Amino acid sequence: MTPSFPIRPAAFCCAAALAGAMGAAQAEKTDRSKPMTLESDKPCVVNLVKQTSACSGNVVITQGTLLIRADKVELRETTDGYQVASATGADGRPAQYRQKRDGVDEYVEGAATRIDYDSRANTLRFEGQATARRLRGTVTADEIHGAVIVWDNTAEMFSVQGGAATAANPGGRVRAVLAPRDAASAPPAAAASAPLLRSTPSLGERR
């Protein structure tokens, strides 16, 4: 297990601001009770004893409102029925994630070179040119960019870290575009029932 990465001061300030702007990213609760479907262009290697699957070639995973697209996916089911998946993209085609938020007409979606999904820990880790956004219906409300983005749905914590400097981002800084959260712009159900995310001083560990 790798150690957690401390957030630089600039990234921590951004995480604190995003906590108030994005609200809790609790996923659709009924998704866990629905069957998971896995499709790919190339044959999958399935080990029924170890409860693992490895697929490549335009892989698509669905479970209720959960949707993961990637070039390669490694999936493991734990003894108590939870799924752990690692999805990686191809050149120019990052892995993608999308899932409905519970109780509101909003979706959270993201893309990165690699996405780690753990249904038991209820966490998502986007690593490598990571982007995450919250949509109200079909309209993008908030959008975040960074090297690593971690979503902890159970703890209601969100963290983002900048990365190496690039031509488009010489300082390697975190970037966020946030919509106002006033009464006029926020959906009534979300404003009344969704608690705010709390910022966390360190990124989650890779599982």
Image (tube, helix red, strand yellow):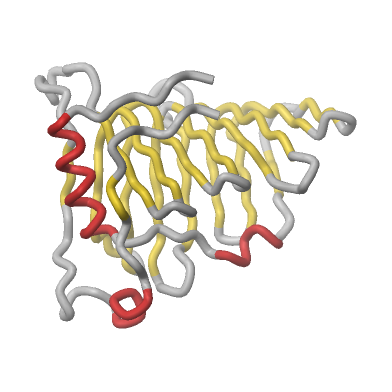
The residue drawn where x is 17% and y is 79% is: 183
Q: Could you tell me residue 182's position as x and y percent?
A: 15, 74
**Foreground residue, 110 or 163?**
163
The residue drawn where x is 49% and y is 59% is: 27
Residue at the far left: name it: 170
Left or right placement of residue 22 versus residue 114 in this view: left
Quadrant location, the C terminus: top right
Q: Could you tell me residue 14's position as x and y percent?
A: 17, 43
Residue at the far right: name it: 49
Left or right placement of residue 143 versus residue 115 in this view: left
Q: Could you tell me residue 116's position as x and y percent?
A: 52, 34
- Tell me which corner region of the image, top left, top right, bottom left or bottom right, holds residue 12: top left
The residue drawn where x is 17% and y is 17% is: 165
* 101, above or below 150, in the image: below
**Foreground residue, 9 or 134?**
9
Left or right placement of residue 202 versus residue 182 in this view: right
* 104, above or below 167, in the image: below
Report the number of numbered marks. 0
- Tell me which corner region of the image, top left, top right, bottom left or bottom right, holds residue 9: top left
Q: Could you tell me residue 180's position as x and y percent?
A: 14, 65
Quadrant location, the N terminus: top right
The residue drawn where x is 49% and y is 27% is: 206
